[in-house]
């Protein structure tokens, strides 16, 4: 449904009072049927030990179902924990001061806030109960959708904490219902295998429209440190931060719009001076405050701007100027909701509404550009009190609007809207912005232009899975290379910096993607060249995770180039095999702080290093003397052992590792005999010995 800007009402939504038992029977027939199965499962003989996963994309529907489950179980005589919705309980149940709904807080105190939350809930829920009554303690876990706003690294760390908490869930006499949106079902299956294995029934899937989850905004110009993981050790490129050109910061003023210049709907009211002064104050405030007043100030600006659009005496230039201001204010409001106050509960529908308003305002402002600048000059109001030579040009304003549109469309398509068509629209917006900035006679803002090239490349990257041809990936390569062309040794070029390292990494990853798809070309050579160019500008001291990811990608590129070589082509270890070993070892040498979990790339690097050393010892064993073969096999075994950071039943590469360890143990036995094999086997973690012994054949 299209939003009409002048009719937007931005006053805060009134809080809804929950009444116990009210409207609990509402819901679709499917949801009622699924809820009945869930309720019967909890009532069954094994209900006290139930560990259940429930999927619901609609957060409002989920809250209603949580409330209903809490209410119905209480009415059935199950001595549950006190409800946060105020449902009446028996005296015994009411005396247990433990909330039945556990809300996860990814920003809670301590190094492991999710694990601590589960520990606390379980410890308080298993308090002694009256042995003469049959009781059931039910805990409902909510809040996993909050992880969506976090970086990939933070998400993985929190999922590991959730997986660690599964052990406590398993031993406690408490029934669990874990609520999560559908996209997180696969994440739980892959990254929290112990929790996934804990469930005692099939997943209960409720229907409902997805509630949008706000994503991180690039308004702060800080590049992220870790690249999103992809199969086989390579990583997808990041959007470079800095989409909103001036990164304006907002501070609350007592009365920023002078009463003499407040907007009105009638004609003849002198509104422009006060409005322009207010817009400048929003743009030029050096830092963003931390209170709700900042958001209220933005809402007020958007509301008054919408009122001004209702005036009947606006010229096309006036209307275009107001729409551009509203585009900026709505975008900043969206960034505030997703970035500045990430710990506060955000109304998902409100986030979606603000996003659509920002997109509409931006598109309408772009549509009015030809009339607004019919003669190619700036309108008198756009420069405010600036001198004529300092006022933004029509091209600069058009560039800013198109790249802001690209950012907003990216945020929307990441919510699952429009798919391939959505990414194509992002490509078109960023491409148009670049065309404007690089037009003849237009002095580009290099920082903004390089950021836009990078964002265009990443939009092409996301379009590539929908395009069976290499055209989208070729577009990504062209965008990254165009941005890198502004760096160099000449006086007129930019010196290579951290952003240069990110661009080279994204370029190398795209080359690696092309090689992975089997496209003909020197893609591995180019990927290696790009990763090597990136490493000096992603140093271990300041960017350990980024350096580790790039080293892993470099090792993977060398390994694949080595594997393309015919086995008989080299009588001695080729340089690519040795370079892959060096890159994987460099990855594992990066220190990890004691209070942080091991980065996921370390497990991949250890497994790949073990395979590389095994090849060195066996494929090229005739080139090595006996001692060097033994050393290579020992290093292969040690590397594999480093990747055994999870028990075999939950390890994502269990079968691959067991097969690799069996081959290595047999090679050790052939090299130095059964005693050496038994000695190596005893060095493995206990849970891994049994599955290996089951398949280990004597020589």
Image (tube, rainbow, N blue to C red):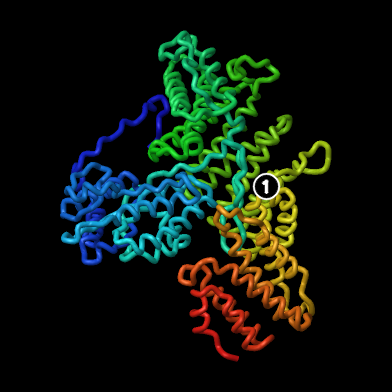
Question: In front: 210, or 152?
Answer: 152
Is the residue 595 above or below the residue 433 in the image? below
Residue that sits furthest to the right in the current view: 490
Is the residue 392 above or below the residue 578 in the image? above
Where is the N terminus found, in terms of image quarters? top left
Question: Which residue is pictured at 60% across the width and 53% down the height?
Answer: 593
Question: In front: 49, or 251?
Answer: 49
Question: Which residue is pictured at 71% across the width and 76% down the height?
Answer: 632
Question: In front: 370, or 650?
Answer: 650
Residue 358 relative to residue 508: left or right: left
Residue 357 relative to residue 506: left or right: left
Residue 645 at what x, y percent from top left?
54, 66
Question: In front: 378, or 264?
Answer: 264
Q: Describe the element under mark 1 as helix, strand or loop.
A: loop
Residue pointed to by mark 1: 542
Question: Which residue is pictured at 77% across the width and 77% down the height?
Answer: 569
Residue 266 at what x, y percent from top left?
41, 12
């Amino acid at each position: 449904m299209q939003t009409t800007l002048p009719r937007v009402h931005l006053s805060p939504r009134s809080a809804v009072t929950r009444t116990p038992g009210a409207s609990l029977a509402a819901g679709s027939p499917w949801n009622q049927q699924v809820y009945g199965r869930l309720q019967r499962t909890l009532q069954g003989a094994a209900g006290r030990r139930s560990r259940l996963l429930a999927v619901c994309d609609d957060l409002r529907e989920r809250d209603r179902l949580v409330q209903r489950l809490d209410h119905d179980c209480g009415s059935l005589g199950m001595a549950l924990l006190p409800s946060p919705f105020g449902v009446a309980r028996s005296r015994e149940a009411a005396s247990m001061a433990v909330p039945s709904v556990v809300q996860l807080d990814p920003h809670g105190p301590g190094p492991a806030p999710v694990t601590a939350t589960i520990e606390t809930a379980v410890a308080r829920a298993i308090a002694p109960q009256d042995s003469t009554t049959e009781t059931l303690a039910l805990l409902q876990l909510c809040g996993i959708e909050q992880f969506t706003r976090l970086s990939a690294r933070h998400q993985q760390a929190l999922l590991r904490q959730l997986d660690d908490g599964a052990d406590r869930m398993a031993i406690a006499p408490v029934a669990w219902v874990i609520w999560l949106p559908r996209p997180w079902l696969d994440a739980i299956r892959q990254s929290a295998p112990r929790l996934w294995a804990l469930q005692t029934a099939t997943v209960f899937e409720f229907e409902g429209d997805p509630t949008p989850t706000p994503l991180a905004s690039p308004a702060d110009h800080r590049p992220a440190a870790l690249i999103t993981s992809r199969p086989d050790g390579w990583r997808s490129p990041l959007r470079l931060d800095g989409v909103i050109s001036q990164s304006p910061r907002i501070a609350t003023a007592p009365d920023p719009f002078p009463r003499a210049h407040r907007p009105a709907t009638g004609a003849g009211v002198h509104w422009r001076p006060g409005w322009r002064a207010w817009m400048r104050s929003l743009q030029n405030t050096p830092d963003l405050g931390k209170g709700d007043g900042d958001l209220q100030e933005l809402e007020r600006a958007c509301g008054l701007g919408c009122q001004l659009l209702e005036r009947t005496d606006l010229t096309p230039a006036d209307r275009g100027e107001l729409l551009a201001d509203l585009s900026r204010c709505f975008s900043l409001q969206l960034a505030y909701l997703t970035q500045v106050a990430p710990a506060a509960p955000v109304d998902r529908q409100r986030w979606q509404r603000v996003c659509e308003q920002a997109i509409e305002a931006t598109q309408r402002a772009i549509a009015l550009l030809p009339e607004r600048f019919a003669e190619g000059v700036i309108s008198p109001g756009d420069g405010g009190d600036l001198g004529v030579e300092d006022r933004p040009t029509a091209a600069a304003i058009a560039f800013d609007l198109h790249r802001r549109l690209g950012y907003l469309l990216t945020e929307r398509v990441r919510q699952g809207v429009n798919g391939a068509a959505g990414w194509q629209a992002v490509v078109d917006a960023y491409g148009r912005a670049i065309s404007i900035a690089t037009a003849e006679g237009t002095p580009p803002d290099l920082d903004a232009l390089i950021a836009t090239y990078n964002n265009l490349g990443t939009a092409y990257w996301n379009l590539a899975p929908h395009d069976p041809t290499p055209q989208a990936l070729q577009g990504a390569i062209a965008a990254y290379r165009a941005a890198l062309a502004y760096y160099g040794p000449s006086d007129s070029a930019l010196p290579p910096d951290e952003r240069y390292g990110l661009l080279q990494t994204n370029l190398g990853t795209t080359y690696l993607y092309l090689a992975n798809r089997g496209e003909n070309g020197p893609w591995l050579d180019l990927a290696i060249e790009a990763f090597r160019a990136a490493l000096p500008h992603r140093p271990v001291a300041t960017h350990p995770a980024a350096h580790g990811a790039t080293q892993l990608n470099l090792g993977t590129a060398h390994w694949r180039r080595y594997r393309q070589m015919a086995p008989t082509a080299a009588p001695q270890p080729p340089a690519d095999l040795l370079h892959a070993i060096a890159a994987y070892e460099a990855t594992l040498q990066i220190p990890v702080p004691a209070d942080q979990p091991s980065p996921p790339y370390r497990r991949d690097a250890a497994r790949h290093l073990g395979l590389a050393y095994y090849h060195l010892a066996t494929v090229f064993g005739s080139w090595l003397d006996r001692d060097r073969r033994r050393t290579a096999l020992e290093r292969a075994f040690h590397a594999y052992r480093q990747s055994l950071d999870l028990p075999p039943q939950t390890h994502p590469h269990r079968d691959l590792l067991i097969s690799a360890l069996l081959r290595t143990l047999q090679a050790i036995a052939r090299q130095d005999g059964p005693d050496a094999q038994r000695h190596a086997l005893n060095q493995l973690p206990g849970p891994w010995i049994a599955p290996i012994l089951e398949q280990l054949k004597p020589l």
